[in-house]
Amino acid sequence: MPFVDSAEECYDYIIVGAGASGCVVANRLSRTNKTLLIEAGGLDSSWEVLMPQHCGLTWGDERFSWPIMSTPQVHLKNSKSTTAYLGKVIGGSASINTMCWMRGNQSDYDSWASLGERSNSAPILVPVACVNKSDNYYYGMYPNNKKEMAQRDWFVNHTGPHTSLGLDVAAIIKTDKKLDRPNANFMFVDSLYGPFPGGNLFQRDHSETPGYMCAVSNAQVFSRGSVTLQSSDFKDEPLVDYDMFSDNRDVQNAIEGVKVVRQIFEHEALSDDVQTVVLPPPHVRSEQELEGFVREMVGSHGYYSGTCKMGSYSDSMAVTDNQGRVWGVGNLRVVDSSIIPDAPSGPLVSVCTMMAEKICDKIQEPQQQF
Ligand SMILES: Cc1cc2nc3c(=O)[nH]c(=O)nc-3n(C[C@H](O)[C@H](O)[C@H](O)COP(=O)(O)OP(=O)(O)OC[C@H]3O[C@@H](n4cnc5c(N)ncnc54)[C@H](O)[C@@H]3O)c2cc1C
């Protein structure tokens, strides 16, 4: 990819943001068009970005990430604010994320096909295939000499345990089989991020304490947040308000998800491996106690979507049609996670990749001017 210091030439396409979606669009359009890709962050060549095992080191490092601090969340314990980080580097958040590739549930996309169609535009969505493969690894269980060997394997050959994040098992499930859609998303991690509770979830503690964790997230989200300006000065950060748990169904789904994970860890099949279940603490059992627990522990996964959603012209909240074309503005498309109309049940890179590929198919149809 050629890099430019000044951009005084004319381009067929200018793409802002070399993230999960922007890179796909740039790859497709630059094959046959003069294309400029503008990225606020730097190259993705640092070891912190490249080494899967320690992706958490990039979170909060201003060389690689944008911090997103929410407004106080009034439905959480002590109205706490939550912090998340988005990628600021070639590859965007996909360069600093936990590399879990999931395509979500088919029902996530059922309503998308008819959204925001202009005449003659076919639905853009078809299923995509998914693969997630890496070696499993129990960091905390390795003796120190093995850890050194692992580091050498990585830095010399890019092989060995550091090629894995330890997040090799994930699932989207219904906590009650009577539900028509999955409501819980589990990601199992093979070591402890501590300290607990309410600790720093972004750094592995590298302790010798072996452990497993399971991050539970809601596969359906009913609460709706907002992103607004706090002033007319563009240098001021926007106000990001998830309004987390403002819809009680989200609280209930979180509780049900936690209950299922607890059942898994307390199951006799794991009794040889699991000595203690640390969280939720053993005494937290009643619905009320579990509610208090989820309101204290919940945070953001960083799967942002829907701030600029696709939808029909008559929908006052819709910004683009189903090809990312901004309603009422010529020659401008939005192609990234912000146009996702409804939060899918899984993480978003597969969705962004699929949307970007499908929209590029449309852009490249012979009759399309843009
Ligand atoms: C910590 C974390 C973990 C995650 N884990 C997973 C996971 O395991 N699996 C998964 O599928 N998804 C995961 N996600 C979500 C997924 O990575 C994102 O949803 C996805 O990358 C969004 O793609 P995007 O193209 O919309 O934006 P991004 O990939 O975030 O890219 C946006 C790009 O635009 C650039 N940019 C922003 N403003 C400007 C500007 N003014 N000028 C120039 N450039 C600009 C940014 O620097 C960035 O590079 C995770 C996200 C985070 C934050």
Image (cartoon, rainbow, N blue to C red):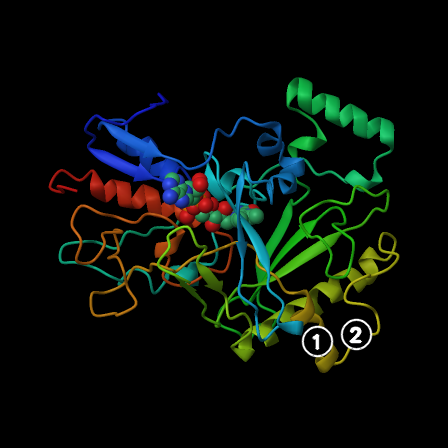
Left or right: residue 132 compared with residue 260: left
Whether residue 30 sits left or right of residue 345 in the image: it is left
Secondary structure, mark 1, is: helix
Position of 233 compared to 164: left or right?
Answer: left
> What kind of residue is marked 1?
Gly
Foreground tag (2 vs 1)? 1
The residue under label 1 is 292
- What residue do we see at 25% from left, 48% from top? 333
Q: Quadrant of residue 34?
A: top left
Residue on which the image places disc 2: 284
- On whether ligand 1 comes within 8 Å of the CB at mark 2, the answer is no
**Which quadrant does the N terminus fall into?**
top left
Residue 273 is marked as none
Quadrant into which the C terminus falls: top left
Q: Is residue 95 above or below residue 117?
A: above
Residue 308: give x, y in percent of width and height: 34, 58
Q: Is residue 67 visible?
A: yes
- Residue at image location 77% in from the left, 49% down from the top: 192
Looking at the image, do the residues carrying marks 2 and 1 touch, with CB atoms under 8 Å apart?
yes
- Which residue extends farthest top? 156
